[in-house]
Amino acid sequence: MSQPIDISFEFFPPKTPQGQEKLRVVRDELAAMNPAFFSVTYGAGGSTQERTIKTVQEMREAGINTAPHLSCVGSSTESLRDLLNFYIENGIDRIVALRGDLPSGMGSPGELRYANELVEFIRKETGDHFHLEVAAYPETHPQAANFEADLLNFKKKVDAGANSAITQYFFNADSYFYYVERCQKLGIEIPIIPGIMPITNYSSLARFSDACGAEIPRWIRKQLESYGDDSASIRKFGEEVITNVRAADRRWRTKPTLLQHESDRTEPCYL
């Protein structure tokens, strides 16, 4: 008998009333699966801060522990401190701590430039109140100099106090297993949760993947291209691909999994 697998679901703050209604429906459907937690993304420079907070509150109405994403680039330590205090006062005890991306037209990255500095700041301000998730990149962050440099940057986040990590989504399971093995050799022992992106729209997936450095194997691209606008075939094929990725190695049975839910999202998926 296979072991149960903990799953979490990632949501993007909706931009429209229709998106808000869709979010509530999907929230209730996914809550029935008893996930370990929900998480809610945060725009560049905190651009979706209000919508993130509102979405976190709506997610919690389903009785599921919810973790807001929190990025540091473009934010002051004062504003971050206020937000951390708000989350503490409202019973939030889990955060996905990220560097984030500087909004277009903003010249200064702010007082904290990297995710390890954010993790260190949160620990200094709040101690062990929050379970801190950070990002990991099995296929290397698109802005990293190389794989080794990216690996050392990840270790800095762990050493700063991260409890666990969520990877950028991937379709090559070997890249994940190699990444975990290299982390173990560096003495990194925190859980590294594999990220999974459901395939529902080829053009969006290709755009997101090219932007965030997630490789779509050529055979998957070619198959998806052959379906054109046949969304039913794309979804069926996508389900088969993701299922096979999940089953690629029995080691998945002991790994929590993140499923990213795409609603009315238009931005690339950066962690």
Image (tube, rainbow, N blue to C red):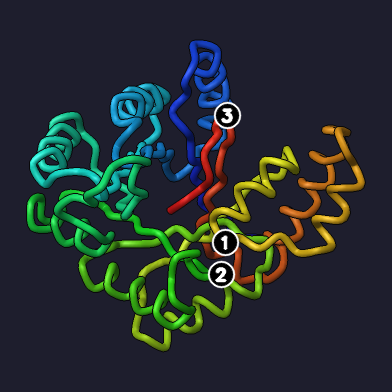
Q: Give the foreground label among 2 and 1.
A: 1
Mark 3 residue type: Ser
Q: Residue furthest bottom?
A: 185
Q: Position of residue 201 (x, y in %)?
A: 73, 38
Left or right: residue 264 versus residue 83 is right
Amino acid on which the number 1 mark rests in the picture: Gly
For residue 41, side relative to residue 7 (left or right)? left
Residue 263: mark: 3
CA distance separating discs 2 and 1 = 7 Å
Which residue is drawn at the image coordinates 49% and 15% (left, top)?
16
Q: Is residue 251 above or below residue 10?
A: below
Left or right: residue 135 versus residue 142 is left
Q: Which residue is mark 2?
A: 139
Q: Position of residue 25 (x, y in %)?
A: 56, 19
Question: Type of residue at label 2?
Answer: Glu
Q: Which residue is at 84% across, 62% downward?
A: 219
Query: Is residue 1 in sight in this rendering?
Result: no
Whether label 2 touches label 1, CB < 8 Å: yes
Distance of label 1 from label 3 (alpha carbons): 21 Å
Mark 1 or 3 closer to N-term?
Answer: 1
**Dot 1 lies on which element?**
loop
N-term mark: 3 or 2: 2
To which residue does mark 1 refer? 213
Residue lying at the far right of the rendered structure? 226
Mark 1 near mark 3, Cβ–Cβ under 8 Å? Answer: no
